[in-house]
Image (cartoon, rainbow, N blue to C red):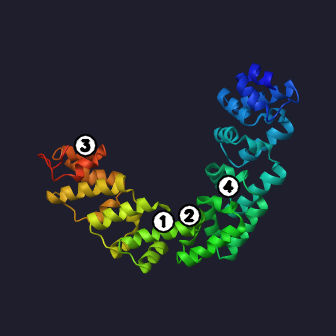
Amino acid sequence: MVDYLVNSLGFSREQAISASTKAPKLKSMDNANSVIGFLEKFGFDETQIHKTISRYPPLLNSDVDETLTPKIRVFQDLGLSGSFVINLVACRPEIMRRDFKSVIFPKVELLKSILGSDENVARVIRKSSWLLTGSNSAQMQKNVILLQKYGISSERMQKLVVHSPRCLLYRPELLEGSLIKVQEVMGIKPESAMFIHAVPLMLICGEEALRSKFDVFKSYGWTETDITKLAKKQPIVFKFSGDVIGSKLNFLMKELGYRPEYILKHVVLLTLSLQNRIVPRAAVFHLLKEKKLLTNKFALCTVLNFKETRFLSELVIPYKKLLPQMYDAYLNKRMASLTESKKQDTCGIAL
C-alpha cells in the first residue's frame, strides 16, 4: 500500500504510512489502478483523488463495476451534478463504504417520501450530505412519525427537513423533549406556522440558553408577555447570542428610542445585522432628515427593510454630488464617521 501511494499517487512517505494504517494491503495493483481510472474518467482531478484516497484508502480495494459504478449512479439519478458528486466523495469518502442497500437507499427513499421529489432530495443532500452517513433510517423514520404525532403536516414536514434536516438525526426522546419545551418555554403551539422554526432552535440552544436570552430582553424592560409575543412571531431572533441581542436592543431602544411594543410590530428589526444594515442606514437616514433632504415620508423602520439596491437608488446615489463623503462612507462601511456626523465638515461627516 505504502509503495503504491508513493509511486502511483505522489504521496509523501509520511502521508502514505499514515494512510496505510486504514488499509494495510492492496487487493491488487490492477484493481487499484482500475479505481483510479474510474475516478479520473468521472472527472476527479489529481488533488481530489489524493484527498479522497488519503481520507479513505480502502476505496482502492473497491470493485468498480459492482460497487463504485452503482453507488455513483444513485447520486446521478437524483440529479446531482458531477462536480457535486466529486466534492461529496472527496469530502466524505466514507459514504462509499456504506452499504447502499441497507443504509443509503433507505435514507434516500425516506427523504423522497417526505420531500416528494428527487429534486428536493438533491437539494437537501447538497445542503447536508452528512445526512446520508449519520444516524440510521429507522431512527429517522421514528422522528418522522413523532413529528406527525405532534400535528406536523406533510407540507410543513417538507419545509422543516429542507431548512433543518438535522432534526431527523436526533434521538427521538431528545426531539420529543424539544417539541414539548417549544410549547412550554416559548409558548408556541404545534399548529403555529412558527413551530417548525422554533423546534430546531430549541434542539440547538436548549432551554437554559434560551432563558438567558429572555433575561437580556428583561434587562431592557421587556415583560414575559412581550417575550412570548416575540417568540410566537419570530423565534429566529433567539438564534443570535445574548451579546448580539443586547447590542441590537441597546441601539434600537436607547439610540433610536423604540419601545418594546413598537419592536413587536416590526420584529424583523431584530433579525437585521446591526453593523451592516441598521447602524449605517440609520446614520444616512438621520443625516438626510437633518438636512431636510428626504423627499419621501419614509419611516426609518421602512428604510431599514429596503433591499440594498432600493436603499442605494433612493437614499444614497441621489446625494452623491451633494454629500460625497456620506456616499463614500456608506459604500465603504466607514460608519464610525457617519455616526459622528455632529463633528462635521462641510458635508456634516467627520472623516
Q: Is residue 53 left or right of residue 164?
A: right
Q: Depth check: give the residue in front, 84 or 228.
A: 228
Q: Is residue 163 left or right of residue 56?
A: left
Quarter the N terminus occupies = top right
Type of residue at label 2? Cys
Residue shown at 48% from the left, 65% from the top: 238
Type of residue at label 4? Val
Residue shown at 40% from the left, 69% from the top: 267
Residue 33: x and y, percent?
81, 25
Which of the two labelled residues, at mark 3 and mark 4, occupies the earlier sequence position? 4
Type of residue at label 3? Asp
The residue wearing badge 3 is 328
Does 155 appear above or below 135? below
Which of the two labelled residues, at mark 1 and mark 2, occupies the earlier sequence position? 2
- Which residue lies most toward the top here? 7
Type of residue at label 1? Phe
Q: Secondary structure at mark 3?
A: helix
CB under 8 Å between callouts 1 and 2? yes
Which is more foreground, mark 2 or mark 4? 2
The residue wearing badge 4 is 121
CB under 8 Å between callouts 1 and 3? no
Q: Is residue 13 left or right of residue 265?
A: right
